[in-house]
C-alpha cells in the first residue's frame, strides 16, 4: 500500500551520506521533506538535487529538514553529489538515503513487494515509480504527496509555497485559495461561524458568496 495523505509516515533505520538515521527521531519536533529518485547519475534528478541544495536555507527558515532517497548505495550518492555540485553550483548539504535492498521504497509503496534485483542492475526505468515527494509534519503524518514522471523536473518553489500554506493553516482556521503566496488573502474555513469570525476578524471580510469569506492573512 502506498503511503497516503494523513497517514503516519513509516519509521525506519537507514544509512545515509551523513550517517545512520532513525527516521522519526531524525524528524524530531519539526517538519521534513523526503523526496525520492529512480537512479543516481540521471540528468533530471541531478538538476533537482542541486535546486534543493540552493533552497535548503529557505526550508531551514521554516523548521523543515530535507532528505533524499534513491535505490542506490551511499557510496554512489557521495560520488553523485560531486557531479551535482559541479553541474549546478550547489553542494548537497542534506542527507541522501541508501536503499540498495529496495526496502524503504517498498515500505512507502513506491515499488511493489515483489520487486527484486540489486541496485546496480536495476535501471531508472525499473525504478520509475520511485519519484515521489512527501511533506511530513511534526506529528509524523503526511501533509502532502507529489508524484512526478522522470521527464519532468520538480518545482521546489511550489513545495515551499505549499509548506507555507500547510504551516499557516495548521495554526489558524483558514485555507489558502488557488495560486496563493505568503502574505496574500486567505479563506475563512466553513467550520468557523460568522459570529466566531467577527471576533477573530473585527475588521471584517469580503464575501462574494455566502460560503466564500476572504480575509487578510493572520499574523
Image (cartoon, helix red, strand yellow):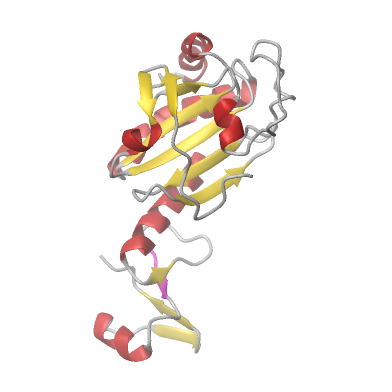
Residue 76 in picture, x, y percent from top left: 53, 10
* Residue at image location 69% in from the left, 26% down from the top: 127
Image vertical order of residue 172 relative to residue 16, above or below: below
Picture coordinates of residue 106, whole percent (x, y) = 61, 32
126 displayed left or right of 93: right
State the extent of the magenta-drawn residues as a range. 184-188
Q: Which residue is at 35% across, 61% downward?
A: 170
Secondary structure mainly formed by the magenta segment = strand
- Foreground residue, 145 or 141? 141
Q: Position of residue 4 (x, y in %)?
A: 57, 51
Residue 154 visible in the picture: no
Q: Is residue 114 left or right of residue 50?
A: right
Location of residue 159 with respect to 88 vertically, above or below: below
> Residue 124 lies in what quarter of the image?
top right
In the picture, the quarter occupied by the N terminus is: top right
Work out whether residue 138 can be spotted.
yes
Based on the picture, tell me whether residue 123 belongs to the magenta stretch.
Answer: no
Q: Nearer the viewer, residue 49 or 144?
A: 144
Residue reaching furthest front?
114
- The residue positioned 47% from the left and 36% from the top of the image is 34
Query: Which image quarter: residue 18?
Result: top left
Q: Could you tell me residue 80's position as x and y percent? A: 52, 13
Q: Nearer the viewer, residue 167 or 106?
A: 106
Looking at the rendered image, the quarter that the C terminus falls into is bottom left
Residue at image location 28% in from the left, 44% down from the top: 29
87 relative position to 116: left or right: left
Q: How many numbered dots are placed on residues in this image?
A: 0
Quadrant in which residue 59 is drawn: top left
Amino acid at each position: 500500500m502506498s503511503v497516503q495523505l494523513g497517514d503516519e509516515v513509516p519509521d525506519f533505520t537507514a544509512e545515509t551520506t551523513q550517517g545512520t538515521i532513525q527516521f522519526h527521531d531524525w524528524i524530531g519536533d519539526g517538519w521534513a521533506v523526503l523526496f525520492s529518485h529512480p537512479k543516481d547519475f540521471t540528468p533530471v534528478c541531478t538538476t533537482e538535487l542541486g535546486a534543493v541544495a540552493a533552497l535548503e536555507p529557505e526550508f531551514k527558515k521554516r523548521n523543515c529538514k530535507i532528505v533524499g532517497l534513491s535505490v542506490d548505495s551511499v557510496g554512489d550518492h557521495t560520488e553523485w553529489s560531486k557531479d551535482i555540485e559541479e553541474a549546478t553550483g550547489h553542494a548537497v548539504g542534506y542527507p541522501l538515503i541508501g536503499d540498495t535492498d529496495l526496502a524503504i521504497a517498498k515500505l512507502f509503496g513506491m515499488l511493489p513487494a515483489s520487486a527484486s534485483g540489486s541496485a546496480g542492475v536495476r535501471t531508472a526505468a525499473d525504478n520509475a515509480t520511485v519519484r515521489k515527494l512527501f511533506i511530513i509534519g511534526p506529528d509524523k503524518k503526511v501533509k502532502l504527496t507529489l508524484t512526478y514522471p522522470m521527464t519532468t523536473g520538480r518545482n521546489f518553489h511550489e513545495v515551499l509555497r505549499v509548506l507555507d500554506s500547510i504551516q499557516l493553516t495548521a495554526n489558524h482556521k483558514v485555507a489558502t485559495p488557488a495560486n496563493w503566496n505568503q502574505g496574500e488573502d486567505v479563506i475563512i474555513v466553513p467550520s468557523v461561524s460568522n459570529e466566531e469570525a467577527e471576533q477573530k476578524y473585527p475588521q471584517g471580510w469580503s464575501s462574494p458568496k455566502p460560503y466564500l469569506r476572504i480575509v487578510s492573512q493572520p499574523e
